[in-house]
Amino acid sequence: MKYRLDSKLVADKATEALANRGVDCEQIAEIVLHLQKEYYSELTLEECLYNVHQVLTKREVQNAVLTGIQLDILAEKKQLASPLLEMIVNDESLYGCDEILALSIVNVYGSIGLTNFGHIDKVKPGIIERLNDKTGGQVHTFLDDIVAAIAASACSRIAHGKHVAPDRD
Ligand code: MG
């Protein structure tokens, strides 16, 4: 039988993968609100959540979520070959593939997304700080960047929306 991708399944599994790793969309929306509030004082958490959901409808985003989380899980279970295993488990500073994968999310939203991503990566607001804290025994080497990229993309979406059409996809 010819391979055919079930787009709905990919979308559902991406959201499910985030939830299984302790990340819900509301926590990402809180980061967005925190970062955008100073520019748009009337911005609500609901609007931020809507934009996070819209970012998650993109296949590029779903692909990055599924790939990154899978690598984190395989590293946690020690099912990757050495030395990749140790690099991911220890979030090795010269291993930049986690950031590069996250950039495939940000790239969908242009240069404002990139600037936001750099800022979030530096400040580590909200849930990103917890994901970065290496004390829990879980590996989140890819996930912290993915969450930062989704938040950055939602910020860009809001910024573009405020300056162009009010509700575009
Ligand atoms: Mg990382």
Image (cartoon, grey):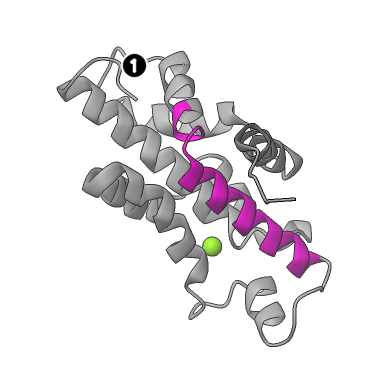
Residue under the image location 71 percent in, 36 percent down: 16
- The image quadrant in which ligand 1 is located: bottom right
In the foreground, 169 or 51: 169
Report the number of numbered marks. 1
Magenta region includes residue 69 = yes
- Using the rendered image of the protein, determine whether residue 38 is visible from the camera's viewpoint: no
Hey, which quadrant is residue 87 in on the image? bottom right
Q: In the rendered image, which quarter contains the C terminus?
A: top left
Magenta region: which residues? 54-76
- Residue type at mark 1: give it: Leu
For disc 1, the neighbor class at 10 Å (few under 14, some 14 to 19, many from 20) is some
Position in image of residue 43 (x %, y %): 34, 16
Position in image of residue 151 (x %, y %): 44, 39
Position in image of residue 59 (x %, y %): 50, 42
Position in image of residue 122 (x %, y %): 39, 56
Q: Looking at the image, is 62 positioned above or below residue 44?
A: below
- Using the rendered image of the protein, determine whether residue 107 is visible from the camera's viewpoint: yes
Magenta region includes residue 9 = no
Badge 1 element: loop
Residue 115 falls left or right of residue 52: left
Residue under the image location 25 percent in, 46 percent down: 110
Residue corresponding to mark 1: 43
Residue under the image location 76 percent in, 41 percent down: 20
Residue 162 falls left or right of residue 131: left
Residue under the image location 65 percent in, 35 percent down: 15
Hey, which quadrant is residue 80 in on the image? bottom right
